[in-house]
Image: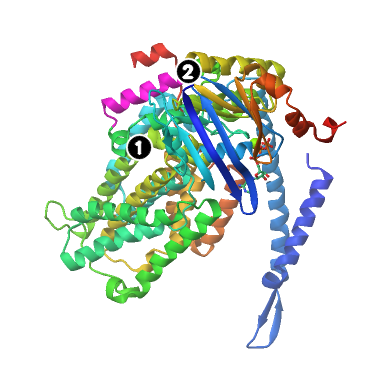
Amino acid sequence: MECALKVQNLSMDFGGLRALDDLDLDVGRNEIVALIGPNGAGKTTFFNCITGIYPPTEGDVLISARGKDRLERINGIKPNKVTEKGLARTFQNIRLFPNMTVLENVMIGRHCRMHAGILGAVLRGPSTTREEKEAVKDSYAILEKIGLAQFVNEFAKNLSYGAQRRLEIARAMATEPFLLLLDEPAAGMNPNETRELDELIKQIRDKEGISILLIEHDMKLVMSMSDRIFVVDYGRKIAQGTPNEIRNNPVVIKAYLGEEADA
Amino acid sequence: MIKLNEIKRAFLVSAWFIFLTFPIMVIRINPVEHIVEWRWKNMALVGIGSFFLSFVWNYLMKQKEPGFKKTETAEKTDTIPPLPPARRIQREKRIYIPALVAIGTLTIVFPFIFSMYQTNIMVSALIYIMLGLGLNIVVGLAGLLDLGYVAFYAVGAYAYALLNYHFGISFWMALPIGGVLGAVFGILLGFPVLRLRGDYLAIVTLGFGEIIHIILQNWNEFSFGPSGIANIPRPSLFGIDLSVHSSTIYIYYIMIGLCIVTIFVVNRLQNSRIGRAWVALREDELACQAMGIDKAKTKLTAFALGATLASMAGVVFAAKTTFVNPASFTIWESIIILCIVVMGGMGSIIGVIAGALVLILTPEYLRAFSEYRMLAFGTMLVVMMIFRPGGFIPDVRRIYKFEGVKSMDKS
Ligand SMILES: Nc1ncnc2c1ncn2[C@@H]1O[C@H](COP(=O)(O)OP(=O)(O)OP(=O)(O)O)[C@@H](O)[C@H]1O
Ligand SMILES: [Mg+2]
């Protein structure tokens, strides 16, 4: 299978704490992959290492954008460069721009695909005007896809929790990624919203051809949509496989249920 | 209705103030004649004064509360909350255009109907408008608390003074050179603080401001130390030297022109890809980076632009006063500019203009009370922060309204 993301022997130390230990993971093109594990397992740290927020202590992060057959090494480059290369993410604890409107939030996502510099912005020539108009139009189109079009002029801080999570996805989509990293997208959502989210993520994969790597605690959601699942505990990979394999894996059950599994 | 416990509270407040001010307001020791004066009248004044002020305070606080509740309910019932007055005026073309014409006419005829003294004060206010708009980019839009902003003002002023002294460079040459130098200094000082935010940034920039001040103060060979540089020429009109009176008027118009250009540039930038990136940076630095915005570049452009504006204002300042020395560029100056931005309304152009006019003009016209200037200044700040935390005219940044695909295509 063609590879979108390939992570090899990734380790991350925080002082004496080894948050990630020799982790391997790969995401194929048009695949939905889940990364699960108990609290504090190192899942978010893994995202931060891939997206350039922390430089990994050891290991390689390789990506291959659409239409490229060679893998490109991206560890150590800045977060904005990672996004430019086509990896976009959402955050576990929502990090929108609260005092900007929904539309503006998405337009920030378009930033790295636009070109106007200071001079262009001041003179506002035809190409800048066109670019701005297109940015508004594209952003609105994304909001329609994600189902937030009715909130277009609201401030992000006034949205409901579920809508804020979706807006984070919309903002990430605006950067035109080939791989979307979602950190607990269903956290804090009610069952109804979760079902819609399930639908939405599958659509993003099917219609936009975007591969997805997600961290999630909601097992129902994970099992229903993932093609493959990776399980980490204490920064180490303890299992990987299809949802069915994971469901029946005794090591995973033990990691999740602790002592009870022995009984 | 005045309730009993309100009276009790006001009474306690006045008792507390009497106690606090007792040593300074009541007792006076006359060291020459070795007698202690007891000024009981002062005590009575403090008591009565604080008693009434406490009432007024309570009243204002109560006024504030219902208004607060009103906006909250408005949000819940999903009705559109009333627009702030500044916004409403902008919307209403019928008010907006005549107001603009009136202000425009007044600005044009100002130096002819008012005295030279007034014009001079107005030029100062205009310089501060420019400084405020520049700092507004850094603090109001990009959210970078810069307490050393005066350094760039000094760079401009000394650039003109020294270039003129050594090479005889004219005002019109110095203006762009000063702008470029400002940008260079903005980037130079911006680089080391790229990683800092909030209070750390404030402290380091404060240090930079002081370093520049100290260099100017002590490096005699370079800056002529505390005695400064005198005889800086005023700007000339097509090579003709003007009298003091007409050159004041000339500088006034130069400053009006510079302010208009600044407003135009800041307004355009605010509603652009760059301006959005600044605001996003202020809102959440990490998310901003994760959305593909180059943090370093965005911060440096904000610093550089702010510094350019300050530096150009500095060139005009040097030309206006014909004399520069380090005393004009102290930390106090940075604080006034910051107050202009914060009190006027962070991120709002009209707010900053209003802030500069109020903060620079009021003290000039209240010279009679100049002893109490600082006191009034402080009180105003505290009262403002309590009753209008967003500033005189809070941010009326044009937000990107989406009005449907069709209307988009038409425009
Ligand atoms: N910046 C940091 N400095 C020091 N330790 C950190 C840092 N970030 C994370 N850690 C530690 O790394 C470990 C993994 O944290 P991480 O946030 O990746 O867990 P997680 O799997 O995302 O957990 P959760 O399911 O609760 O989100 C934790 O022990 C955490 O305390
Ligand atoms: Mg996490």
Residue B293: image quadrant is top left
Residue at x-position 46% and y-position 43%: B142
Q: Magenta part mainly helix, strand or loop?
A: helix
Q: Is B308 located above or below residue B409 in the figure?
A: below
Q: In this view, does B370 lie to the left or right of B171?
A: right
For mark 2, name the chain: A
**Amino acid under disc 1:** Ile
Look at mark 1 in the image and give the residue it sits on: B103
Look at mark 2 in the image and give the residue it sits on: A209
Quarter of the picture holding the C terminus of chain B: top left
Q: Residue furthest top?
A: B406
Residue at x-position 56% and y-position 52%: B381
**Amino acid under disc 2:** Gly
Mark drawn on residue B275:
none
Image x and y of residue B324, in percent:
31, 66
Q: Nearer the viewer, residue B164 or B56?
A: B164
Gap in angstroms between the C-alphas marked 1 and 2: 56 Å
Residue at x-position 47% and y-position 27%: A4
Q: Which of B234 and B199 is in front in this view?
A: B199
